[in-house]
Image (tube, rainbow, N blue to C red):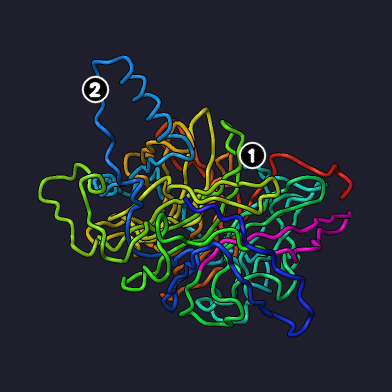
Amino acid sequence: MPDITTTPTRPRPVPSAPRRRRHGLALAALTAGALAVPLGLSPAAAAAPPAAPAAARQAASTVSTTSTTSTTSTTSRDRDRFSPRGTFTANWTRAQALKIAADRSNTKPLVPENFPLMTEKVWIWDTWPLTDLNMKPLSYKGWNVIFSLTAPRDIGFGDRHWQARIGYFYSRDARTWTYGGHLFPDGESFGSREWAGSSVHLRGDTVQTFYTASGRDNGGIDPTDALQRLATATSTIHADSKRVWFSGGRDHRIIAQADGTLYQTLEQSQSGPIIYAFRDPFVFRDPKDKKVYALFEGNNAGVAGTNRCDRKEIGPVPAGHDVPADARFYTGNIGLMEATSRDLKRWRLLTPLLSAECVNQQTERPHLVVKDGRYYLWTISHTFTFAPGLTGPDGLYGFVGKGLRSDYKPLNGSALVMGNPASAPLMTYSDYVMPNLLVESFVDTVPTAAGGVRFGGTLAPTVQLRVDGARSRVVGTRGYGYLPEMRNVGGRGGR
């Protein structure tokens, strides 16, 4: 597995153009990975084709059950396969996805067409709270802090993805949010736009953000530029009685690229009909081994169309279910990598945790909640990214396992946790589940009584989820954009 340890940091730039200035960088020991994003697809809606990693496809060795030594060997082998660094990859099968069915327990409440806006300045979509490495949302000196993909509200709603910057908001009550501006100084980040990730408070006033460097450096506004890499930068957070602000954010570094062996590259994806993915890093500490990992969205490695849907990916489907030939192009996965340095600047790619091959092309914004000893693995997806012969609503999907690398089982038998109602199929998107089982998302496109639509670009009502083992249900809402802290850091000096 590639050990991504030799990427140089971004040099401090000499100020020039006010925005989107980029610098060249030699990425030693990294295999280039990129992506082709068709016009109109969102970052959380841009993903792509082909192949499960060879390590995950190896058949288990046959071991004699008549020998104590062999039994011990089998146990040891299983333990190795299911360690975070192991080779086991769980499957979301077609048989499971065929069970997707909307009902009251998994359908989001309707968002009315007169929903309020958080700000008139920017479109808002993929959003995440400031957290600690234990995944708990934090406040800093009494201020709740969240991060969102933003773009000027005077451009078209569908054009926002190609001008995305990470912005931040702060609030006393976790409901009424003030826009603070861009997180990073102009021209500092890699890529030509900043896509989703996570922001972790490490110590004192230090916040490290992990993000998707989308597009080529100095690439400008180009919807056909599909390159995706994972990057990081550190910032200093400040707060007083009136506001929150950030400084720093200049030490950007590429920490991972698709390698073509575990994760599909741009070059491998280009013969397929849908873009690939290598984005959305979610950084956390595993409570079992105390090591730091990152989940991300990827695709199984291999040239698009060379995979074949096998029994492991199909599962026990009903009689008469035929798998369309083009299902082989749908190869979404939930990737994993491990931090190999204490400063979280060096990482090693690991075998994917979950494969949706022949089921779905996009397993966007993967994240985790550990509750009652169970690992709940969450992802979001669209109707249009399901493989031929399958369907499901735009919404939140989930799986449960006994550890970080596990034989994950789909929640509710199908993986559907909650989706948009049939009368408003594009109503909200980009669900993020917090450890308190509050689920935030953004308002996307809401139908109006006059027969038109109203674009959102603002946070949706937060939904309360209930989870019991492998079952979940929607139990209510908690108001627009409610993302409360679970722990305060930095004292209460900002009050």
Q: Which residue does the image show at 58% across and 32% down from the upper left?
A: 289
Pick out the residue farthest to the bottom.
17
Say if the magenta span includes residue 242: yes
Hey, what amino acid is under mark 2? Ser
**Three-letter amino acid code of the residue under disc 1:** Asn
Q: Residues within 10 Å of mark 1 (few under 14, many from 20)?
A: some
Residue at 75% across, 57% down:
170
Residue 438, how many percent across, how many down? 57, 44
Instruction: State the CA–CA distance, disc 2 to disc 1.
Output: 41 Å
Query: With respect to residue 124, does 359 lie above or below?
Result: above
Local SS, label 2: loop
How far from the left and from the top, in percent, is residue 408? 39, 38
What percent of the width, then of the height, locates residue 281?
56, 55
Density class for disc 2 (Cα within 10 Å; few <14, some 14-19, many ≥20) is few
Q: Which residue is depicted at the point 65% across and 66% down?
A: 166
Q: Tell me if residue 393 comes above or below residue 156 in the rendering.
A: above
Query: Observer-nearest residue: 322 or 413?
Result: 322
Q: Position of residue 50 (x, y in %)?
A: 32, 61
- For mark 2, what is the residue? 64
Residue in the foreground of this view, choosing between 381 and 331: 331
Corner quadrant of residue 71? top left
Q: Is residue 464 left or right of residue 63?
A: right
- Is residue 299 depicted above or below 269 in this figure? above
The residue beneath circle 1 is 134
Q: What mark, if any, has residue 158 been given in the picture?
A: none
Choose top left, top right, bottom left or bottom right for residue 126.
bottom right
Q: Main secondary structure of the magenta part?
A: strand
Q: Is residue 280 left or right of residue 47?
A: right
SS for callout 1: loop
Which contiguous range is marked in magenta?
Answer: 228-252
| Image side of residue 185 versus residue 242, left or right | left
